[in-house]
Image (cartoon, helix red, strand yellow):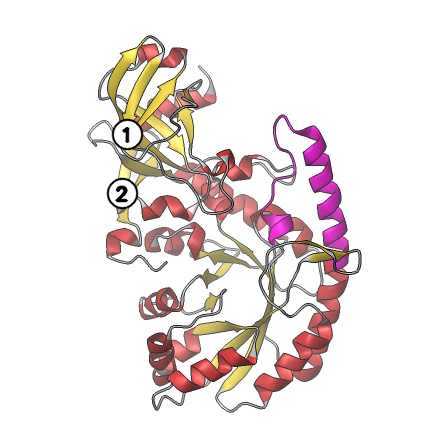
Amino acid sequence: MTARATDRTRYDRATAHLDAPVAIVDLEAFDANADDLVRRAGGKPVRVASKSVRCRALLERVLAREGFAGVMSFTLAESLWLARSGFEDVLLAYPSADRAGYAELTADPKLAAAVTVLVDDPAQLDLVDAARDGGREVVRVCLELDTSLRMLGGRVRVGARRSPLHSPAELADLARAVGRRPGFEVVGVMAYEGHVAGVGDAVAGRPLRSRAVRLMQAAARRELAGRRAAAVRAVRAVVPGLEFVNGGGTGSVQQTAAEDAVTEIAAGSGLYVPRLFDNYTSFTGRPAALFAQPVVRRPGVGVVTVLGGGYPASGAAGADRLPVPYLPEGLRYDPQEGPGEVQTPLLGSPADDLLIGDKVWFRHAKAGELCERFDALHLVEGDAVTATVPTYRGEGHTFL
């Protein structure tokens, strides 16, 4: 029996009392992935990207492990909720236009001490001030450096369109602008190299593309290491007490951790290891988060139909954004239908061994987005569910 077949037996046994659709997290795999992130970080703390987890209980579990410190959040409302729930170090990784949230942040000393907001434009400071509504708490600010690789005089750009601040001088200028504004304090710098950390460099069946990605990423790492170090020096000249410099992501942990300028690493997807993270040479993780759909029809030989399952991931539309049938091995989508809103036909010889009511296990393309579809995660240890915990959705929150 293969390791995957053994896992299927465990998962089926553990959830035999549960009707599908159902989502699980294999805690042995989750903990092993956490240990691997710490190992690759080489002694630098790992800040957990909450968008890739979206479950308070699992955020608490990983932050209780040695080597992890702090949360990287994705909305201001989520940041405030986590801070009120006892998380003491929350870095908001995206600019916000949440006026009500800023009014709450600037009026509450506990929240203001726990939450750091991202800024890459003085207009964002204006928005905070306009929202204060009498709140006088100092707002902790993190500046974001654009990490994109620019070639041919800027005519070619590789990387996400995030911060407009590309040069060390631009970042230092904003640090001075923040310093001149009462009610704000620069405490950190963030530089997320998504084109390195979030793009697989070993895509099955595409050797030429994979080689091109590796060459691009090698060039991007070299360029960014020098520019990030210069940017941090420029900001420290303005803010000598800078608390942290955040960088990296699941796919580039060890490379980013090797940079002296970086003080902490961001990672989250590496805990669940969704299907998009199968295509990396830098690490191999264990799939920890899965969902099951029930077989509801048997249309013919070599075909079963499961309920629903059309849970595409965000990003540019394509086959790689779809969940993948994982257990039993050997199932594939009908190319005429794909994963559907209310039903999904699956093809392959394993279909003939499936009965009405059996579970088919899938892996989502991305990590935390799975939790937007389920209100609970069943935590599996061995062949038993040992706990059931709510997702953000299960706690009544859909932040984005």
Which residue is painted at 33% across and 32% down in the image?
340
Where residue 301 sits, quadrant-wise, is top left
* SS at mark 2 in the image: strand
**Horizontal placement of 227 versus 357: left or right?**
right
Residue that carries the numbered disc 1 in the rendered image: 14
**Horizontal placement of 342 versus 349: left or right?**
left
Please, is residue 85 above or below residue 275 in the view?
below
Q: Position of residue 247 (x, y in %)?
A: 61, 60
* SS at mark 1 in the image: helix
Quadrant housing the C terminus: bottom left
Residue that carries the numbered disc 2 in the rendered image: 387
Foreground pick, 195 / 255: 195
Prevailing secondary structure of the magenta residues: helix
Which residue reaches farthest top?
301
Q: Position of residue 124 (x, y in %)?
A: 50, 78
Please, is residue 273 above or below residue 393 in the view?
above
Quadrant housing the N terminus: top left
**Horizontal placement of 371 versus 18: left or right?**
right
Q: Residue 296 colored magenta?
A: no
Circles 1 and 2 in contact, beta carbons < 8 Å:
no
Which residue is painted at 80% across and 56% down in the image?
152
Foreground pick, 88 / 178: 178
Please, is residue 249 above or below residue 281 in the view?
below
Q: Three-letter amino acid code at disc 1?
A: Ala
Comes first in the chain, label 1 or label 2: 1
User: In this view of the protein, can residue 251 be seen by the observer?
Assistant: yes
Residue range of the region highlighted in magenta in the rendering: 194-223
Q: Position of residue 297 (x, y in %)?
A: 24, 18
Q: Position of residue 241 (x, y in %)?
A: 62, 81
Q: Three-letter amino acid code at disc 2?
A: Ala
Q: Residue 209 colored magenta?
A: yes
**Gap in Å between the C-alphas at discs 1 and 2?**
11 Å
